[in-house]
Amino acid sequence: MSRITRAAKAARNQGWRGLLQVPPWPVRRAWRPWRASIPLTFKALLALLLVVVVVAAGLGYLERARRTAEAAVEIIRLDSHHSPGKGARGSVDVQYRFDVDGVTYTFLAVRSWRIEDAQNAKVCYEPGNPPNQALTKASEPCG
C-alpha cells in the first residue's frame, strides 16, 4: 500500500487530522554528522562537571577541617547593607582582628548575617597557618 493511499484512508477515517499525521510524501531526514557525537560529548561534559564538583567539595571540606583552633575577635568596624525589597536579606561588612602568639591579624569579611551575629562572631583558624581563617558565628563549631 503506498503512502498516498494510507494518507487517503487516514483522511477518510479521521478527517483532516489524519492528513496532518501521515504526510503523503516521503520524509527525508537532514544529514547531521555532528548529531552522533552529541551524546558522547554530553556524557563527557557531565562526567567532567561531576568530577569538578566532587573535587571542589572535597577541597572545601579539607580547608574547613584544618581550621581547628579558635580565637576571640575584636570587631573594628561593622557596616550593614540592606537590599531593597520585601524579605530581602542584607549583608554585613565586618572588619575584625584577632591575636595568635602575639601576632595580630586583620581581615575584612562580608556575611549575610544580622548585626547581632556579627557582634558575637569568632574566628576559626589553622594552628600552623593563622591567615587560613574564617569568621564564623559563635554557635558554629570549628573544624
Image (cartoon, grey):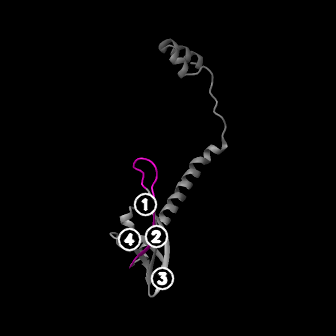
Which is in the foreground here, disc 3 or disc 2?
Answer: 2
Q: Earlier in the sequence, mark 3 or mark 2?
A: 2
Determine whether label 4 and label 3 are within 8 Å by CB: no
Answer above or below: position of 89 versus 76. Answer: above
Q: Amino acid at mark 1?
A: Ser
Q: Which mark is residue 112?
A: 1
Query: Residue 80 is drawn in which quadrant?
Result: bottom left
Q: Position of residue 26 (x, y in %)?
A: 63, 25
Q: Is residue 74 magenta?
A: yes
Answer above or below: position of 89 versus 35. Answer: below
Q: Position of residue 73 (x, y in %)?
A: 40, 76
Q: Is residue 14 magenta?
A: no
Instruction: Give the distance between the C-alpha atoms of the residues marked 3 and 2, in whole angstroms.
Output: 16 Å
Within 10 Å of disc 1 (Cα), the crowding (few <14, some 14-19, many 20+) is some
Q: What residue is shown with label 3?
A: 104
Choose between 19 and 126: the one closer to the eye. 126
Instruction: Give the distance between the C-alpha atoms of the residues marked 4 and 3, in whole angstroms.
Output: 17 Å
Within 10 Å of disc 3 (Cα), the crowding (few <14, some 14-19, many 20+) is few
Determine whether label 4 and label 1 are within 8 Å by CB: no
Q: Amino acid at mark 4?
A: Ala
Answer above or below: position of 6 versus 134. Answer: above
Q: What residue is shown with label 4?
A: 121
Q: Secondary structure at mark 4?
A: loop
Residue extending furthest toward the bottom: 102
What range of the chain is rendered magenta? 71-89
Instruction: Give the distance between the C-alpha atoms of the residues marked 1 and 3, in whole angstroms.
Output: 25 Å
